[in-house]
Amino acid sequence: MKKSTLALAVAAALAGFGTIAHADTTLYGSARVSVDYDDFDSDYVRGPNGELVRTVPGSDAWDVYNNASRLGVRGEEDLGGGLSAIYQYEFGVDVTEGGNFNSNRPKWVGLKGSSWGSITAGTQWTPYYNVIGVGDIFNSSKVFNNNTYLGKAFGERMDNSLIYSSPSWSGFGVQAMLVMNGSCGSSDPQTPAGLCKTVPDNKLPGNLSDGVDMWNIAASYKNGPFFAGVTYMALEGNDFSDFLTAPTYDGDQWGLAFGYNSGPFALTLAYEDGDVNDLYFGKTQNIYLTGQYTFGNNVVRGSYGYVSPDDGQFIFTDGTRLIQSDINNYALGYQYNFSKRTRAWVEWKMNDVDSDLVGSQQTVSIGTRHDF
């Protein structure tokens, strides 16, 4: 490769849109709105004398709900010699309550080589999600939540991230991510209360560590209708052994997923295990199974998940007991495709907790989606 070409490529990566504004750019978006009915049972803890103390009252309500609508641009510029500049700039668009052009949706820039893969920097989908997210098949964004996906806290999109993605080697591929979140002042990172964020929307505290705050690796294989993947992520903070924290800031979490999609049938199975989540204190396991069948313009879906924490109970210094119970997750959905870009859906999901101390939740979602 000529030195002038390499210099241009590096300048494009560092300068972002200012340099690659004339690249092949695509404007895209997705509007996703539903009318939801939410029913939440009360949450309780058990007091020092065994009495039930209500902490969160039950409620039910109707809501016009935005399901992760977005607007973005993405593109690629051929720099010659098998090298390309690539980028994506996507905003969350709340079509129901305002708050447009925000959220940590993907915003990144990088370089891609025809033989060695790509390196990208910014806010990006994690390798963890690119494996376990094979089960994210429903339209309502309330289905694939922290009860059914332990990676919800740090396994979706991460800011301040650097990702290497390999090319496909006969269906095999790998990804590696580093999150380096800078610093946020002189707060004492030896206590959970001393953790601080560089900006409010950062996923991780800026003073979690002096270097790499989180890392994540994944390997996957895709051949025809088959998919298989394995992933591992870890936080590099203090252990806070004298405190009870969720997530565990020096913890780790791993998962594996399998998928099959052929003709009208699609199935996925995922397993997660670790403490890099904010659902429960300590290690937690999750099994999540989905199925889908398509006939004509119709799609029916179903899922079952089972979440089980290692530690079922914690007793605080005042004698209050926190019960951590297994969760059974169910979802059913019907989708009608008016076209390749427009659909309507009816979906139901329920988080059934096997305890009187933590309330169950269920939602009925009736919505529509248009992509462009």
Image (cartoon, helix red, strand yellow):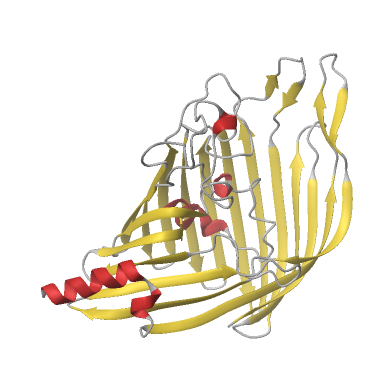
Visible residue check, residue 113: no
Foreground residue, 334 or 173? 173
Horizontal arrangement in the rendering, residue 221 relative to residue 249 (left or right):
left
Q: Residue at x 84, y 17 (%)?
A: 50
Q: In front here: 32 or 263?
A: 32
Image check: 349 left or right of 356? left
Numbered disc total: 0
In percent of the image, x 47 and y 33: which residue is there? Answer: 251
- The percent coordinates of residue 159 (x first, y second) are 47, 54
Q: Is residue 329 above or below residue 322?
A: below
Describe residue 284's horizontal placement relative to residue 16 as left or right: right
Q: In the image as oriented, which residue stretches furthest toward the left? A: 2
Nearer to me, 305 or 96: 96
- Please state, as top left, top right, bottom left or bottom right, where the C terminus lies in the image: bottom right
In front of the other: 171 or 112: 112
Q: Is residue 350 left or right of residue 145?
A: right
The image position of residue 189, as x and y in percent, is: 50, 30
Q: Residue at x 78, y 35 (%)?
A: 358
Residue 194 figure quarter? top right
Vertical order, 284 against 63 (above or below): above
**Location of residue 205 with respect to 251 vertically, above or below:** below
**Which corner quadrant holds the N terminus?**
bottom left
The residue drawn where x is 39% and y is 68% is 224
Is residue 137 in view?
yes
Residue 131 placement (x, y as % from top left): 46, 54
Q: Position of residue 49 (x, y in %)?
A: 85, 13
Task: Name, please, the residue furthest toward the front.
Answer: 186
